[in-house]
Image: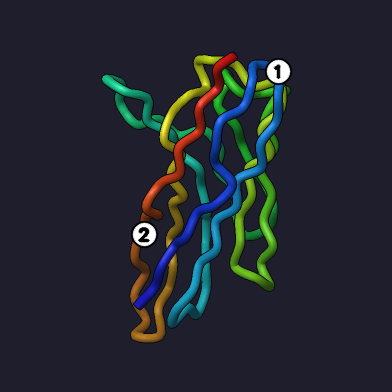
Amino acid sequence: QVQLVESGGGLVQPGGSLRLSCAASGSIVAINDMAWYRQAPGKARERVARIMHDGSANLADSVKGRFTVSRNNAENTVYLQMNSLKPEDTAVYYCNANIRERMGSWVNYWGQGTQVTVSS
């Protein structure tokens, strides 16, 4: 059984920073792309960042220049460094990954989500 567990969310003032982490565990053979999504109340879930196994990444226009995505392949972990946070960044942030399990199939997994609140 594969699990994605996020951590690092919380309450921060506008202009502040947070670092989210997501660790994948279980019967993992390989991980392809890993991504961060967010969903604000009353809004659709949107992708914030995506990073491939080779480290190539892309970010949503709304977070470019403020957020950075990185990963540690040896530890099956992806990070989201969020700087210059704005109130509109408030949302539940979800980790997502395409993982190949020991049985040989690729499966898309979601984490449980972590709340990020930007408020003074």
Q: Nearer the viewer, residue 66 or 103?
A: 66
The furthest residue to the front: 120
Instruction: Tell me what residue is drawn at x 35 percent, y 59 percent.
Output: 108
Type of residue at label 2? Answer: Tyr
Real-space CA distance between mark 1 and mark 2, rounded to the nearest whole angstrom: 31 Å
Expressed as whole percent of the image width and height from the top left, the position of residue 40 reads: 37, 25
* Quarter occupied by the C terminus: top right
Quarter where residue 64 is shown: top right
Callout 1: 10 Å neighbours few (<14), some, many (20+)? some
**Residue annotated with mark 1:** 15
Secondary structure category for the residue under label 2: strand
User: In the image, is 42 to the left or to the right of 3?
Assistant: left
Q: Residue at x 54, y 41 (%)?
A: 9
Q: Earlier in the sequence, mark 1 or mark 2?
A: 1
> What residue is disc 2 on?
109
81 up-or-down from 106: above or below: above
Between 72 and 84, the one nearer to me in the picture? 84
